[in-house]
Image: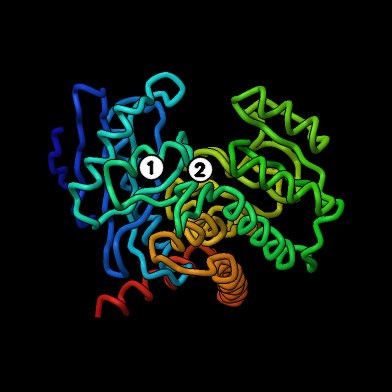
Amino acid sequence: MEITEIAAPEHERVVRVRDTASGLAGIIAIHSTRLGPAAGGLRMRTYADEAAALEDALRLSRGMSFKNAAAGLPLGGGKAVILGDPAREKSPALLAAFGRAVEALGGRYWTAEDMGMTPADMTRIGQETTYVAGLPNGPFASGDPSPITARGIFNAIRTTARHRFGTPDLGGRRLAVQGLGHVGLHLCALLYGAGASLTVADIHEAAVREAQERFGAQAVAPEAILGVEADILAPCAIGAILNETTIPGLRVQAVAGGANNQLATAQDGRRLQDRGILYAPDFVANGGGIINVATEILRISGGEAWVAEKLAALDATLDRILTRAAALGVSPNEVAEGIAAERLSRKAA
């Protein structure tokens, strides 16, 4: 196992992890431990190169610091990425090697499930390190965070709808959902149950067929979903999809979804504002997953009630953010980042 430092001035520590025997090539980024140990999921996906993987890890770990702060959790922000196709290159040996890398950090970073990972993968990683959550079994096991993540996003969509349309009722509303992974499909089920009509897109045809069969969803090509006419867009795939190129083509009145780092730049929050599109900051809207995982990291008994309380508080935070942004005439993302930064600075002081 080879662990080497990567310079990243705005982060506390970033390391490159490599294991020749298993084929592991990854990055662990610790953005902040001001509020507590850095917590954030592990994702495995095909990147163009290591530079792209590093950029993703840095952006995601910073987002986790803000997400945990916004959710009122005593956790810092971190993230890990593994370069490779999880369908072809993930193996028990690779997961074990990653677990040893996490253990070597001595508890400064806790890992959990993210894109390309499963609770079973967390079990294999957990055979090599204590610092893993999202396990399927155990006294404080939190399991798959996807259903709770989807519940938090659903709450955020209802709150966003209330601010945009005057009512949280989604009956008859048109929702465009980008990405039908674990979170996206759970979210579609909640939206369908609330009476929304769905337009969906995903690169995996099987997921699209499932959404069509279960929810009567209309399907469009992945490259077309951002141009669909709908009331609300729910991005639940990769980040940086809201940018100077895509925002002018949006035909929605609000955006609230589960993808991390939806804004390519800070200026894109202002671009949405200028177009009259209400944006629910992603690190607030999608905080349900880390709330669920936190019950395991913090060893909380009676986790279901605690999660429900934290989800309600997170939704109240979003309500305050949207209210304040409207009063000030600024982007909700600007307000949300200000709140999170204030919580981080208070703790640091």
**Residue type at numbered disc 2:** Glu
Q: Residue at x 19, y 43 (%)?
A: 15
Colouring used for the render:
rainbow
- Location of residue 46 by image quarter: top left
- Residue situated in front as seen by the camera: 38 or 55: 38
Q: Which amino acid does label 1 sit on?
A: Leu
Look at mark 1 in the image and give the residue it sits on.
42
| Mark 2 Cα-neighbour bin, 10 Å: few <14, some 14–19, many ≥20 | some
Other residues around mark 1 within 10 Å, as few (<14) / some (14–19) / many (≥20): many
Seen at 40% across and 52% down, the residue is 133
Q: In this view, does 179 lie to the left or right of 261?
A: right
Q: Quadrant of residue 31?
A: bottom left
User: For the point 47% across and 54% down, which residue is it?
Assistant: 141
**Residue 70: image location, x then y, percent:** 46, 68
Residue 121 x, y percent position in the rendering: 42, 36
- The residue lying furthest to the front in this view is 139
Q: Where is residue 213 in the image (x, y as percent from the top left)?
A: 80, 30
Judge left or right: residue 32 versus residue 44.
left
Name the spot of residue 212 as percent of width and height, x first: 78, 31
Query: Residue beneath label 2, please?
Result: 244
Toward the viewer: 282 or 288?
Answer: 288
Q: Which of marks 1 and 2 is nearer the N terminus?
A: 1
Q: Which numbered tag is attached to residue 191? A: none
SS for callout 2: loop
Residue 247 vertical position relative to residue 218 in the rendered view, above or below: below
Which quadrant does the C terminus fall into? bottom left
How many numbered circles are shown?
2
Residue 224 shows up from this direction: yes
Q: Nearer the viewer, mark 1 or mark 2?
A: 1
226 lies above or below 258: above
User: What kind of element bears circle 1?
Assistant: strand
The answer to whether residue 24 is left or right of residue 204 is: left
